[in-house]
Amino acid sequence: MIASIAAVSAAIAIGFSAFGAHGAANAQAAEWLRTGGLYQLIHAVAVVALALTPGSGEGTMNGPNAILLAGSALFAATLYAMAFGAPRWLGAITPIGGLLMILGWLWLAWRLAGSRLG
């Protein structure tokens, strides 16, 4: 299930990135869309790859995967919203998504260190 959610996240990232490249209102909006899309896409692909890795264990990596997806979604969503005219104070929320991504990677590293995948 988490791989399916990550695949949808990747599709969303590509859509917003493409809009940033071809239809953004200004350079700042295009940059926010590009950055949000890049981070969201990288994390979606990582989650799909990990979820489909043989031997990762059913549910073993769901915690780190969920945090990676949530962090990238929050990070990207705030940038997307600002690109479409939402208040700039949303930029203060963006680092929370970044922190969640960092925590997800650290949790994943800890899990991998204790598994046969690491």
Image (tube, rainbow, N blue to C red):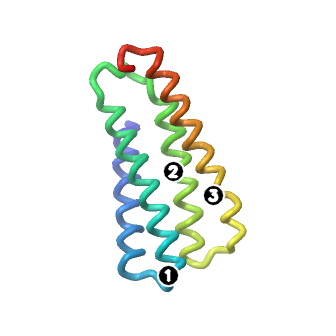
Foreground: disc 2 or disc 1: 1
**Residue type pointed to by label 1:** Ala
First along the sequence among labels 2 and 1: 1
Cβ atoms at labels 1 and 3 below 8 Å apart: no
Look at mark 1 in the image and give the residue it sits on.
27
User: Residue 63 at x, y = what percent?
Assistant: 52, 30
Task: Name the residue nearer the viewer: 26 or 87.
Answer: 26
- Does residue 105 lie above or below 60 as drawn? below
**Residue drawn at the location 54% of the way across and 29% of the way down:** 107
- State the separation of the CA atoms marked 3 and 2: 9 Å
First along the sequence among labels 1 and 3: 1
**Residue drawn at the location 52% of the way across and 53% of the way down:** 73
**Residue drawn at the location 54% of the way across and 61% of the way down:** 77
Instruction: Sort mark 1 into few (<14), some (14-19) or many (20+) by Cα contacts within 10 Å.
Output: few
Look at mark 2 in the image and give the residue it sits on.
72
Q: Name the quarter where the C terminus is drawn.
A: top left
102 relative to 114 in the view: left or right: right
- State the separation of the CA atoms marked 2 and 1: 22 Å
- Secondary structure under tag 1 reads helix
User: Residue 40 at x, y = what percent?
Assistant: 45, 54
**Residue drawn at the location 42% of the way across and 58% of the way down:** 38
Look at mark 3 in the image and give the residue it sits on.
94
- Does residue 9 lie above or below 33 as drawn? above
